[in-house]
Image: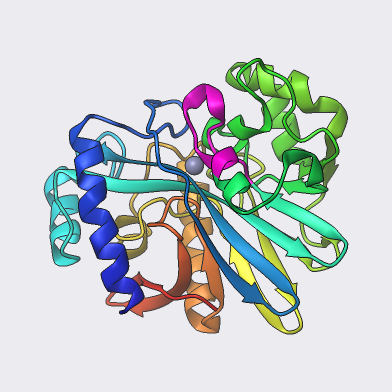
Amino acid sequence: MSQTMRIDARHSSRRTLSAASLFLALGAQAAIAGATPEIKSFTLGADTVTVLHDAAGAMPNNGKVFGLNASPAAVAKVLAAAGAPTDVIHLDVDALLVRMPGHLVLFDTGNGPARHGAMLDSLKLAGVAPDQITDIFITHSHMDHIGGLIDAKGKTVFPKAIIHMSAKEWAFMQATKRAAVVTSAVAKQVRPFEPGGEVIPGVTTIALYGHTPGHTGYEISSQGKTLTDIGDIAHSSIVSLAKPGWTIAFDSDKAEGIKTRERELAALAASHAFMFAPHFPFPGVGQIEKAGDGYKFKPVLP
Ligand SMILES: [Zn+2]
């Protein structure tokens, strides 16, 4: 059974969720989606990667989120060509757990219990307790990525972890009111970095600015195998790839967001590197392929 077929089957069950008006919490335009905990594990060299499912939902195709410089009709055409529903854009929320020699690492943390994210239950399914996590890498400080750093009472969930994020993103997070409860709970654990180097063995940081001021991607590598967490440079596995030049409401600097998206997608399509995107259909792992004047997502595990 191919990955594609499995993911299509999941999509039709997700349609029921969106019919119940479960909308994603992405940045400011928040509405919440619940999800059943779910995990998917695979090997990357000496590492074991586990995708942790957090939430699922859909954004309306109303010209206010996707394709701000296009039209809902143009967005619908792209969705239809991919065989997807044309009235909504499906998005998941997932995080990564990576077991690497000497480190037990998370990449982002999902929505958190206050926003009904399932990431902690998925972590439990993976057999890991929060106080075992040694390092957390944050792509950016929107609540669907940092909400899981705190519990429903606003306390830190991962007391022993070092929280890594770019210096620019940490400055942005500290200046963001919406993130204040998380900022104060975890401030002592945050260790900011300048992107472009290796922070722990096997984790290289990549500046992917635009979605937020300090948005960062991560290349996870072990024994010659790599997986790049691209964060939110692309939200929809269909629309964001087919039309990387379309603006999305969630990008804080829309022009820089487009530039970063176009540059990184071109590099991934050229290298055939494996990538993970938190909002692509679970497990959100695959390759980027050139398609027409844009790209398409090929769901496949390393
Ligand atoms: Zn996001």
Residue 23 vs residue 14, the one in the foreground = 14
Residue 116 among magenta residues: yes
Find residue 272 and report its horizontal and vertical position in percent: 51, 82
Q: Residue at x 50, y 75 (%)?
A: 301
Relative to residue 161, is residue 46 depicted above or below? below
- The segment highlighted magenta reads 108-121
> Residue 148: image x %, image y %?
61, 33
Quadrant (top left, top right, bottom left, bottom right) of the C terminus: bottom right
The quarter of the image holding the N terminus is bottom left
- Of 24 and 266, the residue lying toward us: 24
Q: Is 37 left, or right, of 9 in this rendering?
A: right
- Which sits in the foreground, 125 or 185? 125
Q: What residue is drawn where x is 74% and y is 46%? A: 136
Q: Is residue 62 in view from this perspective? A: no
Q: Residue at x 39, y 78 (%)?
A: 289
Vertical comparison of 28 with 301: above or below: above
Q: Nearer the viewer, residue 37 or 200?
A: 37
Asked if the stretch drawn in magenta spans residue 198, the answer is no
* Side of 64 relative to 171 (left or right): left
Q: Position of residue 149 (x, y in %)?
A: 68, 32
